Amino acid sequence: MVYHAVQETSSEATPEELAAMDDRITSLKEQLESVKVQEKTLKAELAVLNSRVSSTELLSQIGQLELRKDTLNDQLAHLCKETATDRIVTEEESNRVQKDWATWKKHASLRKLACRELWLKCTEVLPDNVKSREELWESFGMEGEL
């Protein structure tokens, strides 16, 4: 015994129905394009809105910053009290420090001059495959200009 399913006979569409379907497809494609443009615009607007900080978050940050400011002001006031009550520098001590500073500044400039002269003598005969004086100076981690 063989069973056969009852099938509907195929109903072919008339040319008018096909034309109506084509028109419907065209209008739906146009609607789809306009909806995609609208979606893109709305996504861009949403990205802008999401990138902004909310007012509640701003208020929270302001509160934290005010607390930090108060803490720093307290620390500053404490440090100012400490330095004011320490000791007063005498004129003699200030003159001695200025004199020492001038002496060591002179020593430093003489050493700098000697270093530069020695460097120039050493780098006069660099082989061709070695970097330039300036690049070699920097590669050694030396600071300042030649």
Image: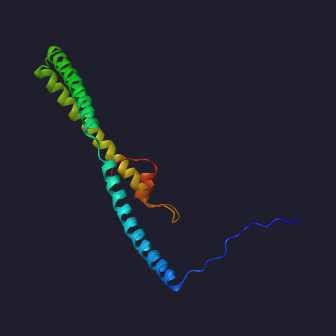
Expressed as whole percent of the image width and height from the top left, the position of residue 5 reads: 75, 66
Picture mark count: 0
Residue placed most toward the observer, 41 or 25: 25
Q: How is the image coloured?
A: rainbow
Left or right: residue 129 compared with residue 75 = right
Left or right: residue 53 compared with residue 83 = right
Residue placed most toward the observer, 50 or 140: 50
Expressed as whole percent of the image width and height from the top left, the position of residue 82 reads: 19, 16
Residue placed most toward the observer, 116 or 4: 4
Picture residue at 40% right of the left edge, 50% below the top: 118
Which part of the image, by quadrant, shows the N terminus?
Answer: bottom right
Expressed as whole percent of the image width and height from the top left, the position of residue 85 reads: 15, 14
Image height of 126 relative to 110, above or below = below
Q: Residue furthest right?
A: 1
Expressed as whole percent of the image width and height from the top left, the position of residue 45 reads: 31, 56
Image height of 78 relative to 44, above or below = above
Residue 2 at least partly seen: yes
Picture residue at 27% right of the left edge, 34% below the top: 61
Q: Residue furthest left?
A: 91
Residue 146 at least partly seen: no
Picture residue at 35% right of the left edge, 46% below the top: 114
